[in-house]
Image (cartoon, rainbow, N blue to C red):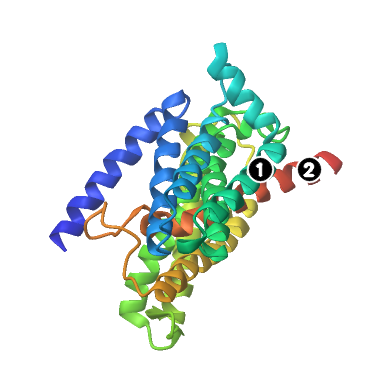
Amino acid sequence: MKQRIITGCVIAVFFVLMMLSLHTPIFAMLLALLSVVAVYEIHRAAQIKNVPITVLSLIVAALTPITYIGYDSSGAVGDFLLFFRENSSVCLIFYILAVLILMLAQYQKTRFEHAAISIFSSIAVSYSFSSLLFLRDIADLPEYSQKSEGVFFILFSFTCSWFTDIFAYFTGRAFGKHKLCPTISPKKTVEGAIGGIVITMVFNLLLLLVFNRFFFEQAAIPYWLIAVSSVLLSIISMFGDLSASTIKRNYGIKDFGKILPGHGGIMDRFDSCLFVWPCLYGILKLFSLISERI
């Protein structure tokens, strides 16, 4: 427990540093680092031994967030990142072909599922981390016009992911009687899930109240949107957590990694976040499109 608390403090410090670097290229680079570690953990869990495929997947995982840095880069590097971002569909085709060719080159120790896992993990995980950049730049959408809204939605995404789990744990310990998914995660209860969803929603409404009072120049985010989104994203975060647990059970492992003592690996810490971030951006973009047409 002591080790878990210490690691939690380190994570909190890292989170603060990330928020301080929010509008700098460092933020995208940190996301690239987290993406690389998470994809590597998945490769290790799946026991993928084809080193060239792993290296290529890690390169793609790193490049995806970096190409969405959101600032004007100059020179050869900037041109390359711009080309990669604007021609992502073409790059994806060549990436898939490259993985399949590398699978053939080392077919003795590479199964098709290894190639599929490499492609899926490097794309899904890296784009999920990149969603934080989309949330940061939410002011680019017509319905949102303040940079502080990007900060709010990033904090909102983390509360939906992490606070749902925390509040569900304590509520479940106090009132839990009915198992939620006993074969996948025996400790989760229906009562805990409901408590986590409700308490997180209340917390997020208070968070919006604080931002409206101290940080927003104008109150533009409806409370009903935060309430509904909070409930939906809390449920989605639970699916993310259960999906990660299913993957770990498939491979007979307790944690994806050991980089965070007491918490496991990057995938163990961010599994629910990887579901929440892109879904939140999708909700906000849909709300913006609907508002334009009304």
Percent position (x, y) of residue 124?
57, 52
* Amino acid type, callout 2: Leu
Quarter in which the C terminus is drawn = top right
* Residue drawn 69% across the image and 30% down it: 86
| CB-based contact (under 8 Å), mark 2 and mark 1 | no
Instruction: Using residue 158 as the reference point, say whether residue 252 is left or right of it.
Output: left
In the figure, 90 relative to 271: above or below? above
Closest to the observer: 71 or 228? 71
* Residue drawn 30% across the image and 39% down it: 14
**Disc 2 from disc 1: Cα separation:** 28 Å
Q: Earlier in the sequence, mark 2 or mark 1?
A: 1
Farthest residue, direction bottom: 177
Callout 1: SS: helix
* Residue drawn 57% across the image and 30% down it: 67
Quarter in which the N terminus is drawn = bottom left
Percent position (x, y) of residue 179?
43, 86
* Front disc: 2 or 1: 1
Label 2 crowd (10 A; few <14 / some 14-19 / many >=20): some
Instruction: Using residue 140 as the reference point, say whether residue 208 is left or right of it.
Output: left
In the figure, 117 relative to 101: above or below? below
Instruction: Using residue 49 as the reference point, say whether residue 212 is left or right of it.
Output: right
Q: Quadrant of residue 17?
A: top left
Task: Return the residue at label 2.
Answer: 289
Task: Return the residue at label 1.
Answer: 92
Percent position (x, y) of residue 280?
60, 50
Marker disc for residue 152: none
Residue 193 seen: yes
Q: Quadrant of residue 162?
A: bottom left
Farthest residue, direction right: 293
In the figure, 37 relative to 20: above or below? below
Farthest residue, direction left: 2
Label 1 crowd (10 A; few <14 / some 14-19 / many >=20): some
